[in-house]
Amino acid sequence: MKLFLSPHRFIETNEPLDISISVNPNSDSVRAWYLDKPTIEPVRTDAFLGSVEEGGGVNFRNIFFNPHGHGTHTECCGHITKKVHSINQLMKQFFLPSLLVSIEPEKIWNETYNEFDFVIKKHQISALIKTKSHVQALIIRVMPNSATKKQMNYSDTNPPYFEEEVVDLLNELNVVHFLTDLPSVDREIDGGKLAFHHRYWNVPDLPDLNRTITELIFVDDSIVDGEYLLDLQVAPMENDASPSRPLLYQIKTVAN
């Protein structure tokens, strides 16, 4: 079904492009931060069995996972504030004008940790979007791209990350929602600084309650860079972060 955004621009509501990774109990499911795989198990008591396969009347299973380390998730400033703000309470808008760009990080020597890092720089992003209008959501696909990202265990791998100054560009563009296929916008081991997180949310000075970061997405190669309408679906959990399902819709133009 066509949903018109203007007299000449529309989306097809039956053609979503899912860029999420599910919470999956398989041993090869994506995870980070030194976590084991998620667990999904039937409830078992003396009076009840939550497995149809094992003879129960219904499937009734407990799920144990961490939203920051298992699958696609969206987080708010409560991730780094003393008060644990709830993403469920702060998210008020879900359909968002968005821009997808693909970037290959720069390889730099990190003297502090005596190893090479792969860092996405402000000038790289700026070069791709300097002619674009302001967007509410910016989506970064890190290159090279591969479906192996959906099975990656990022723990102790020093994944790519963003330099802190990228936030200045996001401020210029009025970006409110930042999405990436990385496990974090900051370096895996950084002594607890989380420089990007703090600068992006202006913590501790005046925490920005409107901004979100979405991590561990996966953008298939078939999805081209450009402008989309983003539907950022977030599970209603009272926590600083929650599993999410970002969907992209291609913006089409009415033929003359």
Image: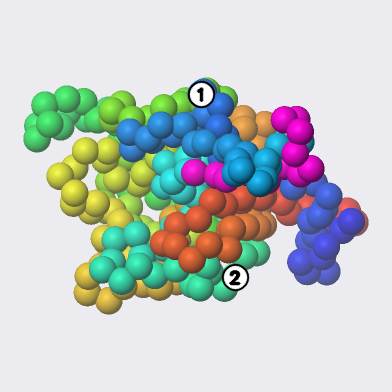
Which residue is tagged 1? 27
> Nearest the camera: 182 or 99?
182
Q: Is residue 186 left or right of residue 221?
A: left
Confirm whether residue 127 shows in the render. no
Q: Amino acid at mark 1?
A: Ser
Indicate whether residue 57 is drawn in magenta. Answer: yes
What residue appears at the point 59 percent right and 58 percent down from the top-left corner?
A: 235
Are there few (<14), some (14-19), or many (20+) residues within 10 Å of tag 1? few
Residue type marked 2: Gln
* Up/down of 58 relative to 239, above or below: above
- Residue bounds of the magenta highlight: 53-64
Query: Is residue 189 something that shows in the picture?
Result: yes
Q: In this rendered view, identify the residue nearer to me: 48 or 209.
A: 48
Is 116 a magenta residue? no
| Separation (CA) of disc 1 from disc 2 | 35 Å
Circle 2 sits in a helix, a strand or a loop, which is it?
A: loop
Say which mark, if any, is on residue 86. none
Q: Which residue is mark 2?
A: 93
- Disc 2 crowd, CA 10 A, few/some/many (<14, 14-19, 20+): few
Q: Is residue 226 above or below residue 38?
A: below
